[in-house]
Amino acid sequence: GQQLNQSPQSMFIQEGEDVSMNCTSSSIFNTWLWYKQDPGEGPVLLIALYKAGELTSNGRLTAQFGITRKDSFLNISASIPSDVGIYFCAGVANAGGTSYGKLTFGQGTILTVHP
Amino acid sequence: DAGVIQSPRHEVTEMGQEVTLRCKPISGHDYLFWYRQTMMRGLELLIYFNNNVPIDDSGMPEDRFSAKMPNASFSTLKIQPSEPRDSAVYFCASSFARGGWVSGELFFGEGSRLTVL
């Protein structure tokens, strides 16, 4: 099946630093998404990308849909302590021959921010 | 508006017992997903429904797991009999279609943490 390779697996940074994480796949996705999960909660959608090459910002977050449709990155600028959590990339690929897409999640990046 | 509602939040049971997890999706959403999350395997898709019909259940581990969606506002995930390796957090999520496809914009519940002793 389709797999997403997300890196890095974990990051330890100082408050105020910028963060970058990415996801790659061997197959094409039609939609890329980034989620954040706080401890004890379900993942929450941060950014959704629908077009190859698309660059989208949401406050201090910026994400891009790779031009090859096989990768995406997420940047967080000027990190703050509440950015702590697990970040997941996810991709939707059209299931060929059907009208339903299949959503696949990456393994997650654990972010720790030291004050 | 209420989000996705899951119950119970926590369940501790003994091996061999039946476990039923419940989910109420967001009203108007076409898709409902059941995920399992563990440290070792991350987020795993178990099954998803479109308009109450199961579309892909290839992630259901084995016959001990079953899921139903009798109507648009309710779904259950049942494990019978439960085993210690089923211990995990089970998430329900709902979503809507975009251009005829699953949008990928999932709204997750808070999860049900299952511990099987």
Image (cartoon, rainbow, N blue to C red):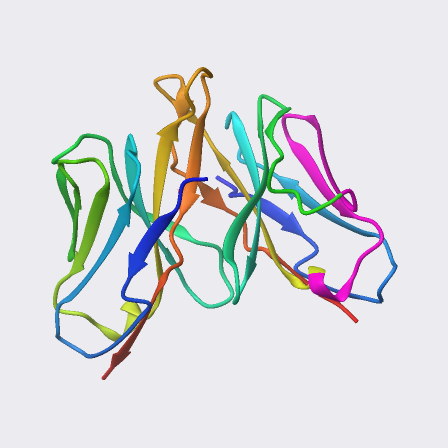
Q: Residue B6, position in %: x, y?
A: 63, 49
The answer to whether residue A68 is seen in the rendering is: yes
Image quarter in which the C terminus of chain A is found: bottom left
Q: Residue B69, position in %: x, y?
A: 69, 30
Kindly identify the residue that appears in the image at 36 percent across and 34 percent down.
Answer: A92
The vertical placement of B114 against A11, above or below, is: above
Q: Start and end of the magenta stretch?
A: B63-85
Is residue B79 shown in magenta? yes
Give the quadrant of residue A114.
bottom left
Of B92 and B60, the residue lying toward us: B60
Left or right of B71 on screen, residue A5:
left
Kindly identify the residue that appears in the image at 31 percent across and 37 percent down.
Answer: A27
Q: Residue B47, position in %: x, y?
A: 60, 37
Left or right of A103 on screen, residue B93:
right
Is residue B94 shown in magenta? no
The answer to whether residue B27 is seen in the rendering is: no
**Residue, far right:** B16
Of A58 and A68, the residue lying toward us: A68
Kindly identify the residue that appears in the image at 88 percent across and 60 percent down.
Answer: B16
Left or right of A38 on screen, residue A84:
left
